[in-house]
């Protein structure tokens, strides 16, 4: 199969590797342009861009597909199919229609639940017990196209977004290659999505990463898991040297009560709207992730302090 691949983060790189390993021809790779990153704000290439470059694959990084030149370049590859995974750009109708078999998207949820940009994080933050990956044919809507293949996975109570991401990337890479093989034989069958239970997974914004201690401990724990390891749910507190931000990467629920946000002992137990959270792993700005015990040795948080 002549394949155009379109993706940006690690989730997509795993798929690209598997497609190549199964002998399909990658005629072009599309990925997001390099972005400023780090303290020096030097431009950083995406995971897919780096991998494609290492193999000498022809790579494009358009900001959008609004120009006729970009559209005609895409059409000129005469691809059998475009494979899309966490690409990050809206594809206009001429792009969707250009490949012989259209554009197939690997989506990290069990559609129609969690259409949109952040399905992995939103599933955990909502406390879902199950999610998965799906192969769908893209249409003009947002993750509304017909579905051809799916693989479900349980979300364990301790699973973080990072762990779920890695597992779905592994499963999705296998699922899409199987779908490609069926497509090549003319045996890939699509079925329309059921609109019942449809919901939207909005992109994670920085403001919502702040922990709201008025919520229940279970809700906050899901919030922490859904944002771990990135961008990281956080609180702020004055430890005697000004206000500092601390990310919480792991916490456990305990049966205790107190004013929300109040530190209840000297070992990281924080009162919530219902029950309390024992902080287990944290990270201060500019520092490495560490256990709460390590953190408290360098920066004690005494009972009675209020976190914000």
Image (cartoon, grey):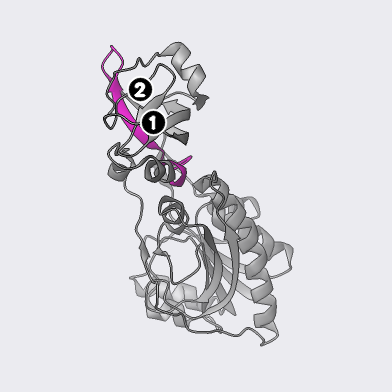
Please provide percent x and percent y for residue 156: 57, 50
Distance in Å between CA atoms under marks 1 and 2: 9 Å
Task: Read off the residue under disc 1.
Answer: 256
Provide the residue span drawn in magenta.
Answer: 224-243
Residue 28 in which image quadrant: bottom right
Please provide percent x and percent y for residue 41: 38, 35
Residue 26 in which image quadrant: bottom right
Q: In the image as oriented, which residue stretches furthest toward the bottom?
A: 186
> Which residue corresponds to the image point at 29% horizontal and 19% vertical from the top-left?
305
> Which residue corresponds to the image point at 35% horizontal and 22% vertical from the top-left?
264
Q: In the rendered structure, which disc, 1 or 2, sits on the residue that comes first in sequence?
A: 1
Question: Closer to the observer: label 1 or label 2?
Answer: 1
In terms of secondary structure, where does tag 2 sit? loop
Is disc 1 in contact with disc 2, using a CB cutoff of under 8 Å? Answer: yes
Which is nearer the eye, 19 or 117?
117
Please provide percent x and percent y for residue 191: 53, 84
Which label number is shown at residue 264? 2
Which label number is shown at residue 24? none
Tell me if 75 is positioned left or right of 151 in this view: left
């Amino acid at each position: 199969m002549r394949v155009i691949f379109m993706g940006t983060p690690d989730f997509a790189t795993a798929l690209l590797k598997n497609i190549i390993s199964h002998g399909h021809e990658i005629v072009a790779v599309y990925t997001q342009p390099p972005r400023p990153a780090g303290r020096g704000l030097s431009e950083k290439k995406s995971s897919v861009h780096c991998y494609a470059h290492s193999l000498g694959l022809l790579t494009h990084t358009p900001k959008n597909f609004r120009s006729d030149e970009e559209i005609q370049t895409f059409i000129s590859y005469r691809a059998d199919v475009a494979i899309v995974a966490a690409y990050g750009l809206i594809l206009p109708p001429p792009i969707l229609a250009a490949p012989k078999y259209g554009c197939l998207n690997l989506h990290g949820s069990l559609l129609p639940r969690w259409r949109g940009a952040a399905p992995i994080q939103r599933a955990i933050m909502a406390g879902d017990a199950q999610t998965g990956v799906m192969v769908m044919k893209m249409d003009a809507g947002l993750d509304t196209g017909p579905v051809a293949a799916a693989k479900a996975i349980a979300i364990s109570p301790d699973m973080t977004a990072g762990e779920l991401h890695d597992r779905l990337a592994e499963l999705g890479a296998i699922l899409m290659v199987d779908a490609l093989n069926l497509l090549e034989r003319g045996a890939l069958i699509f079925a329309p999505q059921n609109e019942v239970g449809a919901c939207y997974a909005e992109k994670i914004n920085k403001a919502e990463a702040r922990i709201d201690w008025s919520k229940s401990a279970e809700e906050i724990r899901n919030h922490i898991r859904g944002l771990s390891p990135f961008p990281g749910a956080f609180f702020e507190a004055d430890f005697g040297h000004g206000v500092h931000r601390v990310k919480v990467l792991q916490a456990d629920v305990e049966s205790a009560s107190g004013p929300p946000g109040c530190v209840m002992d000297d070992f990281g137990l924080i009162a919530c709207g219902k029950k309390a959270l024992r902080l287990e792993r944290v990270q201060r700005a500019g520092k490495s992730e560490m256990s709460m015990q390590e953190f408290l040795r360098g920066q004690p948080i005494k009972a009675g302090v209020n976190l914000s």
